Image (cartoon, rainbow, N blue to C red):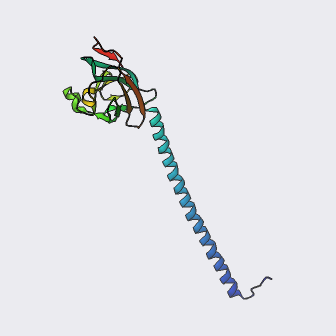
Amino acid sequence: MFEFINDEDERGQVGIGTLIVFIAMVLVAAIAAGVLINTAGFLQSKGAATGEEASAQVSNRIDVVSAYGNVTGEQVDYVNLTVRQAAGADNINLSKSTIQWIGPDKATTLTHDTLANATGGNSKDNFNTTSVKGDTDVVLVQQSDRIQVTMHSDTLTGNLSAGDEVQLTLTTQYGSKTSYWANVPESLKDKNAVKL
C-alpha cells in the first residue's frame, strides 16, 4: 500500500518536487488574488461614478417659477420662462442646457444662443437668457437666483394662437429634465401679455 523510499537520493528528489509544486501553487494563488483585487477596485470606482451621475440627474434640476407670453396682434410671438435651481441643486449652466419644444405644428430642440444675448435678437431653434436676480445671466448659482429664458415662437412655429399648447422640456448639463406645459388662453383680445 505505501511504498517506502530507502534510497537517500530518491527521497531528496521527491522533496524538491513537492517544494516546486508548493511554490507554483502559491504563485498562482497570488496572481489570482491580484486579479480579484484589481477587479474589485475597478468595480468600486465605476459604481461610485455611476452613483454620482445618477444623483446629479435627480437633484440638479431646474424649477419653472413663472411663464408668460408676449401678445402682438392677438398672437403670442415669444414665450418667457423664469427659472431657478431646484432645492439641493449644484450650479446650473443654462448655456449648456437644451430645451425641447413640442408645439402645435413643430418639434425641435433649442440651444442657448450667446449672439442673441449680445444683439437682443434670437435665431431659429435657439433660446436666450437674461438675469432677473443674481450675478449672471447664464449660470444659476444660488436658489435665490432667477433667470429669464426667452423663446421666439414666431421663428419656431409661427406665432401661437389662442388655445395653442406647447410642451417644453428643459434638460440641464447633468441630464436632469423638467417638463412644463405652456397653454395659451382661449382669448387674447386687448392683451399685451398673458400667463402661460
Q: Quadrant of residue 168?
A: top left
Of all residues, the one furthest to the top in this rendering is 190
Quarter location, residue 72: top left
Q: Is residue 29 left or right of residue 50?
A: right
Task: Name the residue at 56% across, 58% down.
Answer: 36
| Residue 93 place in picture, x, y as percent | 34, 33
Q: Is residue 28 visible?
A: yes
Residue 66 versus residue 171 in the image, above or below: above
Q: Give x and y (percent) for residue 162.
A: 33, 19
In the rendered view of the protein, which quadrant contains the N terminus? bottom right
Image coordinates for residue 18, horizontal then vertical, percent: 66, 77
Q: Where residue 118 appears, x then y in whole percent? A: 20, 28
- In depth, the one of 84 and 157 nearer the eye is 157
Residue at image location 45% in from the left, 26% down from the top: 87
Establish if 12 lies above or below 133: below
User: Which quadrant holds the C terminus?
Assistant: top left
Q: As rendered, which of 82 and 125 lies closer to the eye?
A: 125
Query: Going by the image, does 37 lie left or right of 73?
Result: right
Residue for point 75% across, 87% down: 6
Please state if 3 lies on the left or on the right of 30 as rendered.
right
Q: Is residue 148 above or below residue 176?
A: above
Can residue 146 be seen in this snapshot?
no
Residue extending furthest right? 1
In depth, the one of 167 and 32 nearer the eye is 167
Q: Along the line of sight, which residue is nearer the eye, 13 or 85?
A: 85
In percent of the image, x 39 and y 31: which residue is there? 169
Task: Name which quarter of the figure residue 32 lies in.
Answer: bottom right
